[in-house]
Image (tube, rainbow, N blue to C red):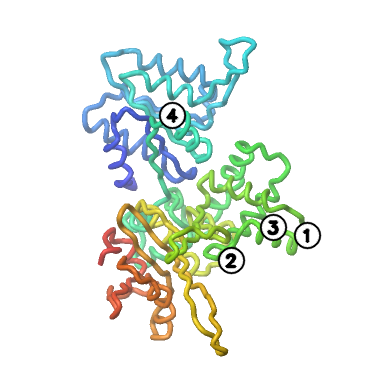
Amino acid sequence: MIERKKYLEKLISKKENGLVKVITGIRRCGKSYLLFNIYKNYLKSIGVEDDCIIALALDDDENIKYRNPIELGKYIRSLTADESKNYYVFLDEIQKVVTIQNPYIEGVEDKVGFVDVVLGLMKRDNIDLYVTGSNSKMLSSDILTEFRGRGDEIRVNPLSFNEFYNAYQGDKHDAWQEYYTYGGLPLVMQKKGHEEKAKYLQSLFDKIYISDIIESSKILHDKSVLDDILNIISSSVGSLTNAGKIAKTFKSEHQVNINDDTVSRYLDFFIDAFMIYKAERYDVKGRKYIGSPLKYYFSDVGLRNARLNFRQQEENHIMENIIYNELCNRDFSVDVGVVEYCYKDENKKSKRAQLEIDFVANKGSKKYYIQSALTVADEDKRQQEARSLNRVRDSFKKIVVVKDNIIPWHDDKGILYIGIEKFLLDENSLDF
């Protein structure tokens, strides 16, 4: 069993807090296992009886009838009728519950869906409710509006490198290469060899991810466009892009005219399904967001690599994606930093230029500026990677993460240089 200690601790801290615990994340990242196995085992270890833990997987065809919200509500109430007991109710993949016409109100347009069921069950004092979902738009918007502060979201990600490393059965020296190639979806670790791992990852797109998007977004004829946009984003991880640039790529490479709004809408489908994340550009000195272009990163690099048939294995871009995911795992808000500066050209005319900082990570009062680099083995390369960091005049910590396995050290301006594995494996690495 792979321990998801961080997520278990979050669930324990929110236990019986009067809110519905909404566990979100990309499908196959381990949400169900976290709830149905790890958290269930914890509850049993503190004396909760089996009949007080009710777990229902709504994506299981045996439970199709409970995708009807009326039937679901009746079923859960029938199992929690004993008011002398406290029940823990797990509803897995809640977005599978359909929205139907209210059968009790005739002649009035009134709909009933999963939100109504959740709100109804929350009124029962003897129910502690947990739901999982794989579509952020449907869940997050409902949490904010319909639940009115009664929802508590827990985002679950694929395995971090630390989780992967601790569970890895092979030579630990091979763990990094295995991780940046096949990613951290838990079931990948059970597959043997490249062919089996690649087949599993590639099958997830058509069998689950793309199918889910088509179903939830009611796209009937544009699967090929979805596929092409996903391929373009896969190829441009770590590069600045926007909907307009992608639309131009369609026109030049696919001879297809597609407008910017359509591209943006399709990108949002992938974001809503937790397949990709969007990193905005932030002007460090001006303290403002710049807007387009921006960067997209995959929630799992194995999926990104599989999408490209493992043909584009640029370790620098993959490493950057992994660092982004790690910062998100540590609950940071992450932006792409931009540092503007002025200089005079050879004609002594004033010019304005921009330098990029890979990541500006914020959490509460903490802020870190982070660069990703394959190496800083020679002084010219080190100066190049530190150039943007040295133009930031505030006192927040500045870090360069390199692929090389080095002993962490600071230069004369206080910039920390640290190897990628040390950075990922030590949760205190940002504060060395």
Q: Give the residue displayed 50% in from the left and 26% down from the top.
A: 114
Q: Is residue 405 above or below residue 106?
A: below
| Mark 2 vs mark 4, CA separation in Å | 45 Å
Foreground disc of the pair 2, 3: 3
Q: Residue at x 28, y 58 (%)?
A: 427
Between disc 1 and disc 2, the foreground one is 1
Depth check: give the residue in front, 67 or 290: 290
* Vertical order, 184 against 409 (above or below): above
Q: CA distance from mark 1 to mark 2?
A: 24 Å
The image's mark for residue 311 is 2
> Residue flagged by tag 3: what amino acid is it?
Ala
The quadrant of the picture occupied by the C terminus is bottom left
Q: Which residue is mark 1?
A: 255
Residue 408 percent coordinates (x, y):
28, 73
The x, y position of residue 244, in whole percent, is: 66, 58
Can residue 197 be seen? no
Tag count: 4
Is residue 152 in view? Answer: yes
| Label 3 crowd bin: few (<14), some (14–19), many (20+), radius 10 Å | many
Q: Which residue is mark 3?
A: 247
Circles 4, 3 touching at the beta carbon (< 8 Å): no
Dot 1 or dot 2: first in sequence order is: 1
